[in-house]
Amino acid sequence: MKYLKLKSENIKVFYKDFQALYDVNMDIQEKRVTALIGPSGCGKSTFLRTINRLNELIEGTRTEGQIYLDEEPIYEKDRDVVGLRRKVGMVFQKPSVFPMSIYENVAYGPRIHGIKDRNRLSEIVERSLKAANLWNEISDRLNSPAARLSGGQQQRLVIARVLAVEPEVILMDEPASALDPISTSRLEDLIGELKKNYTIVIVTHNMQQAARISDYTGFFLNGHLVEFSRTDELFVNPRDKRTEDYITGRFG
Amino acid sequence: MGKYIEDGLTAYRMKAKSEKISVPRPHRIKPLNLERGIEWLLKLSAAIAILAIVLITVFIFARGIPLIFKTGLIDFIFNLKWSPSHGSYGIATMLVGSLVITLSSLIWAVPLGILSAIFMAEVAPSRIGNLLGRLVELLAGIPSVVFGFFGLIVIVPFIRSHLGGNGMSVLAGAIILGIMILPTIISISRDSILTVPKEYKEGSLALGATHIQSISGVILPAARSGIITAVVLGMGRAIGETMAVVMVTGNSTIIPGSILSPVRTMTSNIVLEMGYAAGDHQAALFATGAVLFIFIVILNLVVSFSIKAGKNYAN
Amino acid sequence: MLTNNTREKLIKAFLWLSGLIIVAILFIIIAYIAIKGVSAINLDFILEAPRRAGKEGGIWTTIVSTVYLTLVSLLIAVPIGVGSAIHLEEYALRRSWFANLVNLTAETLAGIPSIVFGLFGFVFFVIFLQMGWSIISGSLTMAIMILPTITRTAQEAILAVPAEYRENSLALGASKWQTISRVVLPSAVPGIITGIILSIGRAVGETAALILTAGSSLGMPGGLLDPARTMSVHLYILAMEGISMDRAFGTAFLIIVLIVIINYLANLSLCRMSQVSRQI
């Protein structure tokens, strides 16, 4: 039983005069991991950020085309962007914890969405930290500053913070690029668990990682989505010559 | 709001599983009015600075300009006679007083200030340089009335007993004002020397120039616009200074004949007479303020021009 | 002709000398006032109200007036200054005419001499708005004077908050104002405090503008509409009218002690600010 969670239709993104994306069409399935790969500057992160409309934070950005989340268009004049971003969480490249305690970091999202009850907050914090495989390591020091955690722990804290908002889609922008190999492998395990409940779109520059964790893979080059298919197909039988060059490392 | 997280999510997921049901349009979670209101409030607070400067200009000029028209601009500026009881409002002596005091304080404070800025930025070990920087900040924080008091009880008697006159003089004003503008000159010059790219100095040293040669030949020219800014801002502070000057210069409305003669500045004039002035007399003080204001605006323009010129130079 | 080496050494010695002169100037001023002032200071001097125009008694009412005036001007200027910094850094488009104009006026305001502010405060607050010589007239004038400092330090502090904080918060579905009020501003607090401390220093030392707006009444101010004499104004009048040099020294010494403390606190909060940004 497959359900189409996200659908992008002819997405184009411009930064002032520069066109960063050309007509990207992509179907993203619910509760699957979709990986976006490609050389740096190819537009994969830009595409990721169209899904929660985060590109709009940069002055001079213009987006054309449409993305449907559960068949609802997200690029509409009166679309509630705040509500969209609640449904579509995002994990960034550099784990950026807020300068608050661990507890407050996780409780931040639920709080801004109006939950004030202490017990409910604690419950959400615990559940989210457990889901992010962090609870066992830090349950005894929830009130210490989050900045004291290690890089890998910070990245899982950021994921817990996203989970606390109960999103349906989680976008990840090279979440492992700042992590050591052990933390990376724990993160990959975590992604495997999360996909039982969440739709995950992940940008990675690490092709092995994409092959290990994703169900679908899209290859971007110079702002074009060159190829998009099941991960096993794309890595074993790429249809496009350019994809083949890239995944076999012959890309100059 | 919380309700959406609790119930909406599960309900939505159940629908999503049966695939065919179209998902209801998500309702607006929070009216955006609060956000809009805050945005306007913030913009309004930013506008207050503009409002303040407009009000300052309008009120001072509105109160002062009619008197200038009444006496005539030429008479107001060049008439040597300030005698409110006789209806004679000429600010020439005060205009000259302000300029004389300002220039004579710059004469010694600018060289000393620039030299110590060079010392702090280039010659002193960084610990000493930083310590000195803090002391200069402290000097900048001392209120002008304290400087004036110090001048009144130390400098004025010193001049009286060693150089003659009654001590209240151009010289006393120049010494105290110079001390007061030192921090402005030092800290801005020092900053601009510190921001000169290291490569300039290294390049010069690599050519066999000595440290001092590199300072005078490469670093100072590159920091030129910052140093000019420092001097002009120091000048602005000197012209506008009131309390310290009023306490040490004797305040006679005459053109000073020597550095030992007393003098009155435009600022002193305002603070001395505002308490009891009325009518035309008060208007004349406002007109003096307007002239001062114009001086400061011109100096500000010079500063922004010199900063711009500095940017061009750097490019 | 001197050799290059001796000339180099001579010039360096000269530069050391100029640094020493600066230290000497500061040291002489502070030491002189401290030595002469410390004997005038005792608990009575601080806690007693002045009598006979300040010839006798202490300076208690002027201390209260100084604190009163400083607090009221901060209450007015801090929300406006921080609000305007938030607008400039978070909402205004860079290089919009409005933002440029605000920045320009802030610069101009910072350069205007205090006597001009005094004139304005006198004609606008005291006369036009009929507030008279009062705490409120003085505080409103003072508030305009410290506005540029508060705005600029807050701007710098907000600018130093990492962009990732904003992205993360927005990506969690927070609105712009929620992001600013819960993540950006708390991180900018040390910088804002630095601005407040610097402003306190300015308010404590201000004289010219306050003589024209708050008056010089020695009484204990009861309300916002009462006139008041701050410590600096008191020092000026004591010294200029030769009322009591002892008490002038004591007042000057207390002002300097306050300024040294304020300076120390400002440095401390600047240090904390750079530590916070290093943590990030």
Image (cartoon, grey):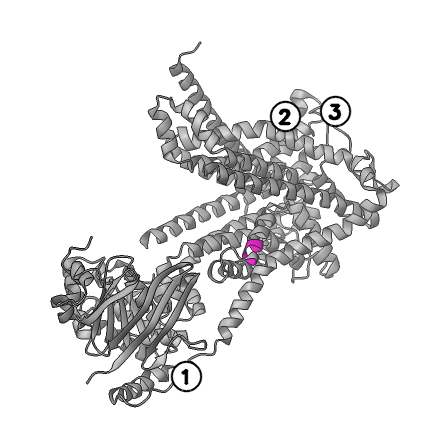
Protein chain holding label 2:
B
Q: Position of residue B118 (x, y in %)?
A: 45, 30
Q: Which residue is mark 2?
A: B158
Work out whether residue C63 or residue B259 is closer to the camera in this orientation and state it: B259
State whether residue A183 appears in this view: no
Q: Are marks 2 and 1 on the same chain?
A: yes
Image position of B66 (left or right of A220): right
Does the magenta portion include C100? yes
Q: Nearer the viewer, residue B22 or B111?
A: B22
Q: Secondary structure at mark 2?
A: helix
Q: How far apart are the two marked residues, 3 and 1, measured between alpha carbons?
A: 82 Å
Q: Name the residue beneath numbered marker 1.
A: B27
**Where in the figure is residue B67, as x and y percent of width and height?**
82, 47
Callout 1 secondary element: loop
Q: Is residue B184 above or below residue A68?
A: above
Residue beneath the point at 42% across and 35% down: B196
Question: Based on the displayed image, in which of its 4 quarters is residue B21 positioned?
Answer: bottom left
Task: Judge left or right: residue C191 versus residue A201.
Answer: right
Residue at the spot of label 3:
B257
The numbered mark, 2 or 3, whose residue comes first in the sequence reads 2
Q: Is residue A25 visible?
A: yes
- In this image, B218 relative to C60: left or right? left
Determine which of the numbered discs, if any, sits on residue B214 in the image. none
| Quarter occupied by the C terminus of chain B | top left
Span colored in magenta? C98-102
B181 part of magenta stretch? no
Mark 3, secondary structure of its residue: loop
Camera-side mark, 3 or 1? 1
Q: Amino acid at mark 2?
A: Phe
